[in-house]
Image (cartoon, rainbow, N blue to C red):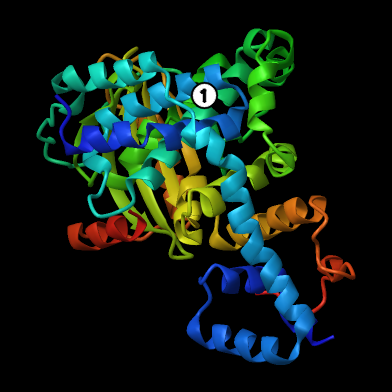
Amino acid sequence: MADEFGQQLIALLPNLRRFAVSLCKSRDIADDLVQTTCEKALANRQSYQPGTRMDAWLFRILRNAWIDRVRKSRTEGPATNIDDAHYLIGQDGAAVTEARLMLDETAKSIANLPDDQREVLVLACVETLSYREASQVLGVPIGTVMSRLARARKKIMGELGIEDGDKRSEDKEGFVK
Amino acid sequence: MTGQRFSDETLMAFADGELAPDEQKSVEQAMETDEALAERVALFLDSRGTSQNALKPLLNEPVPDDLTARVTAMQDGGANVTAFPQRQSPPTERRWALPLAASIALVAGGLGGYFTGISSTDQQQDLALDLVTQPAIITALNTVTSGEEKDLGSVGRFKVIASYSDASDTFCREFEVDRVDRSTIVAVACRPEQTWEYRFTVVAGQSNSGYAPASSLEALDAYLDAVGASEPMSTEAEDAALKSIN
């Protein structure tokens, strides 16, 4: 018997899953993360403020759960080392799923971005969070969100061969906020 | 090359409609006469739609039935997980003077965020760090008011002792976590930007009372003095501070 909160949670599962896959590049781990996120969200639902974006609130929980998992895997030793896990993705047949992620060149470019740039790109451009909302999800200042996001976007557009002409993008002159 | 007057971040914010009105106007004006600048803006505009299209298939993928079923089941059993018993907090005179034994591990001053490394291999300290980076604690820091106590399940019982601002006017909170194994962590977390940082953490070893040993609290008091902590905030000031971060 899902109330409105629960219904919204179910409705957002595809978005949570997409963000989770973009973080961990594995559907199995992503589904696990989404489940953990929902558990935490239900247990802490009183901290959600109605009227604010529920997806942003859930993304923050999900990302914290991911960080937690990565950190634990580091302290627990090699058994669940996340770097190994990435290799395993390619070995156990899950490579197929990653190939699915890389549906086209852009998706491939996005997958190849550094983690910190990929997550902000997905949040701001794909999930359409504002810079402020993204900064709250990621726990970094807005200026950091903007610089990472700008780099990510230039990178994926550059790799698609539509970067503007004369590399002025590398130029650090001019005023920077 | 007038385009160089604007940083990538400024042009991106313009493309995203996130620029302040006056800045927006100056970019608009410049774009009228600077084609290269308009191209740079177009690149940021295009990148948004391009990214969305690229990851659209992932959104359209069916969510595995068993995942949906598990999340639905969680809600059906939700009464067990949604309502934390809210214990009335005891009168909050500082409990520091309680005489207690125990091994104290001074974990750190100046611990950074999630990935802070510490040189010590002391398992207890690792456990403490593990604890204080739990999302539940972060959520509690954002919501629980001073004197309030909250059961965080396997994490333990979370209590905020007081909120205050430090010398640089940063919002800080002093809190305790009584863990299931009866040890207590006393910590100070501050929020200089958008994220909590642990500034001070003490692990009080096994104790029967659940209260932190007095000696660890002397260290805490010394720390608070050193950073120029204000008097504890009033309820109203704390409410306002919490509202501003949520």
**Where A62 sits versus B64, above or below?**
below
Q: Out of B31 and B182, give the one closest to the viewer.
A: B31
- Do we see residue B245 in this rendering? yes
Q: Residue furthest right?
A: A166
Q: Is residue B236 left or right of residue B43?
A: left
Chain letter for the residue marked with disc 1 in the picture: A
Q: Quadrant of the C terminus of chain A?
A: bottom right
Q: Secondary structure at mark 1?
A: helix
Coordinates of residue A101 in the picture (x, y in percent): 64, 30
Coordinates of residue B87 in the picture (x, y in percent): 12, 30
Q: Which residue is mark 1?
A: A30
Q: Which image quadrant for residue B186?
A: top left
Coordinates of residue A71 in the picture (x, y in percent): 58, 25
Within-10-Å neighbours for mark 1: few <14, some 14–19, many 20+: many
Coordinates of residue B127 in the picture (x, y in percent): 49, 19
Q: Which image quadrant for residue A113?
A: top right
User: Which residue is found at the position 36% from the left and 48% from the top?
Assistant: B173
Q: Is residue B206 left or right of residue A137?
A: left
**Where A3 sits versus B197, above or below?**
above
Report the amino acid beneath label 1.
Ala
User: Which residue is found at the position 23% from the left and 34% from the top?
Assistant: A7
- Do we see residue B104 in this rendering? no
Q: Which image quadrant for residue B187?
A: top left
**Where A40 sits versus A121, above or below?**
above
How many numbered discs sit on the rendered protein? 1
User: Which residue is found at the position 66% from the left and 54% from the top?
Assistant: A148
Q: Out of B71 and B60, give the one closest to the viewer.
A: B60
